[in-house]
Image (cartoon, helix red, strand yellow):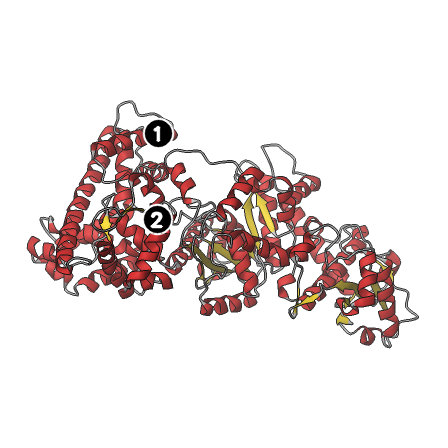
Amino acid sequence: MSAGADLAGLLAGQPDTVVLTQAATPAEARLIQERIAAAGGTDRTPVSLGPPGSSDARIPPSVLDRDDVRLVPVRVAWLPEEHAGGRAARLHDLLPGHDPYHPSEHQQERILARQPDRATVLVGEPATVASLRQHWAEATGGDDPAGFGGYVARRATLALDRAEYRLLGPRYKTPSLVKEEILSSRRFRTGLSQVRRGPGDTPPSLDEAGQVLDELAAGWSRRLIDIMPNLGRLIFQRGFDPQIDYDDSQVERLRGAMQRHPCIFLWSHRSNLDNLVLSAAMQEQGLPPAHVFGGINMAFGPMGAILRRAGVIFIRRSTGDDPLYKYVLREYVGYVLEKRFNLSWSIEGTRSRTGKMLPPRLGLLSYAADAYLQGRVDDISLLPVSITYDQLNEIAEYADYARGGQKKPEGFGWLYGFIKAQGARHYGKIYVRFGEPVALSSFLGAPGGPVAADPAARRLALQKTAFEVAWRINQGMPVTATALVTTVLLAMHGTALTFGQVRLGLADGLDYLESRTVPMTASARALTAAEPVRATLDALAAGGLVTCTADGREPVWLIGPDHQLAATFYRNSLIHFLLDTALCELAVLRARDAAADPAGAFWDEIARLRDLLKFEFYFQEREEHRRQVGEEMARHDPAWEDRLRAGPAEADALLAGMRPLVSQVVVRPFVEAYRLVADVLAEDDLPADPEEIARRALGLGHQYVAQGRLRSAESVSVLLFQTALLLARNRGLFEPVPDQAGRRAAFVAELRDLVRRLDQIENLAIQRYIRDAVIAGPGG
């Protein structure tokens, strides 16, 4: 059995053809020789390159003396045993000596005796010495004639790799000889000569660059391509439904995108399960795997070596102080994309512990942009991915972190605890959604264009690209039943609701989401009926998040103070869908009190709120966002601007008719957290250390909760204080400028006024809720 080019056709009547063989065992050498003989090449003396993957293989100079000599690479590929109509490694193949793709010599002889169809002789695409010499000169500069033999050997290996993944399928396309290829590249060496670690320093050596590549470079063991998604599945299926929930049309769109250009999967990061889930999803859908970037902190013990062989690229958390590392990482990313391998990373750079998306990180995306702008790839498809869970075990950890706790270091003890926790109870379903791809060229223009020449324009284009991807991730993230129920219960700030009251609270939210065609899971859509609501409450109660008191006339449910921070994780996964209507409510109140031009005051307030919350939420471009806000107001009343101009009474009536009222749910936690930080900033003995400011805000928050000055404890969060500090710094509230105390006091006043308006809307919402409950009668 053979695969690849027709060896008989290549040898027939071609005396200037030389066969290059790669054999690791006598059995492989015998198979290759038999294949050559069957192709009519009994008079040929093949040239051995040694075993596959040898990094020091060289072609003898005598073979390369004549430019018209044609070289044909050949080796043996071994296939796993067939099971259920497919060939793939299984879990027991992880044991030492059980790799079905690389059997031992003894195993090879047994396979040939019993299952000869598992052995395939591969024939790589031929190439003449002349064409190889031209490519070598272009790639390396051709300034080291002694290196030509090694280059040809590497080309032969890569040609056989291509033949092998054509045999196995695109899923098994794997990079090889990466370090050798990069270090021999003229592009790489030229760039390396310009790297300086300090003034007057000499460029780093190739050996130093090679050490960085050893830390970065990841490969794919074909055995692990088969097994790792199954191992990941064993972990997350301990607590979740076995079947991942997809949108089939999105999968087919994704499949088409992956055929056109190299792709980068950019995903929302909510859990340490995310990459396991995405890998399993791609395997289930028959999609090629992607190299995933992970923090070097996860490369502990033997796990690091295993994960590198499973395509994980471990990178340092901070690279700003090492220009060599940054250069090698940039070139490595460019090489991987140039060879049309796919990449994958969290666009946020770290897990979101609040449930909503964090600002995007541009570092790796910038390196991908370099590869495109340098013409190394025609284009790159950025693939937005959202991974959503009904429930997560990790939210308890996130809540502790928000209260000021410390992150636990990763290690085997941490890994054991994490895996064990997945089996503690049933967490529901996992949902994977693939957004519409974003072409990098659509934001960066053509290579060599104005964006490439202007660093400021390039950075702005990258920011717009990242925000567009993040926007599409958010818009594709389905609302779950858990998110809806926790939103209703959190809105009560610890007051319990009967079953009928919970259903009443859900009704407006479901109507709103349906009217906006917001994506929802099947379980969320089912909340119009009683049983799915009860099942969701029971699941949340089983997880300890919701408390049910059942010893009165009828059961009541609430989220107590100790669990409110954890519950916000689920609520925050949907608030971006409610953001525009929340801003509209607050802007209507501002317009109501405007002395002149209420419509103008409305739009000014939208701009102010957008600026206030710009580090919390993703906003579209100003004009596009203005159009969206206008559509949202028109949904409530097409004549809304005329009603605002008609006076305060009409503005009140407009606000009273807006359903649902959500700003007290969506915006309040962030505004109250900002207010805590602002109150600390206004103190006379303001500390210089941001962490100390956050600690003081934490203590002040505990005081305010005890005094009833905050509606709930969910605003007392270090995670929200970090964004508040970012906003304060952006507004220049840390700079030594005249009347800084006055500016900080103005910040406090702005936030207190906003809290006052939130109180008004919340009071209106409560009045409406009481009225609706009376109309609905007992049982809701």
Q: Amino acid at mark 2?
A: Ala
Q: Are marks 2 and 1 in contact (CB under 8 Å)?
A: no
- Please tell me how crowded label 2 is: few (under 14), some (14-19), or many (20+) other residues with Cα within 10 Å: some
Indicate the quadrant where residue 52 lies. bottom right
Read off the residue under disc 2: 541
Q: Amino acid at mark 1?
A: Arg
175 left or right, relative to 539: right
457 left or right, relative to 411: left
Indicate the quadrant where residue 672 lies. top left
Residue 278 versus residue 648: which sits nearer the camera?
278
66 left or right, relative to 254: right
User: Which numbered circle lies on residue 265?
Assistant: none
Q: Is residue 518 visible?
A: no
Q: In the rendered structure, which disc, 2 or 1, sits on the residue that comes first in sequence?
A: 2
Q: Is residue 110 visible?
A: yes
Residue 775 versus residue 434: which sits nearer the camera?
775
State the residue lying farthest toward the top.
Answer: 685
Residue 68 versus residue 661: which sits nearer the camera?
661
Residue 706 versus residue 121: which sits nearer the camera?
706
- Please tell me how crowded label 1 is: few (under 14), some (14-19), or many (20+) other residues with Cα within 10 Å: some
Q: Report the number of numbered marks.
A: 2
Residue placed at 41% from the left, 44% from the top? 395
Residue placed at 32% from the left, 64% from the top? 526
Q: Quadrant of the N terminus?
A: bottom right
Helix, strand or loop for disc 1: helix
User: x%, y% of residue 58?
Assistant: 82, 54
User: x%, y% of residue 314?
Assistant: 58, 45
* Alpha carbons under labels 2 and 1: distance apart: 32 Å
State the residue lying farthest toward the right.
Answer: 43
User: Which numbered circle lies on residue 695?
Assistant: 1
Helix, strand or loop for disc 2: helix
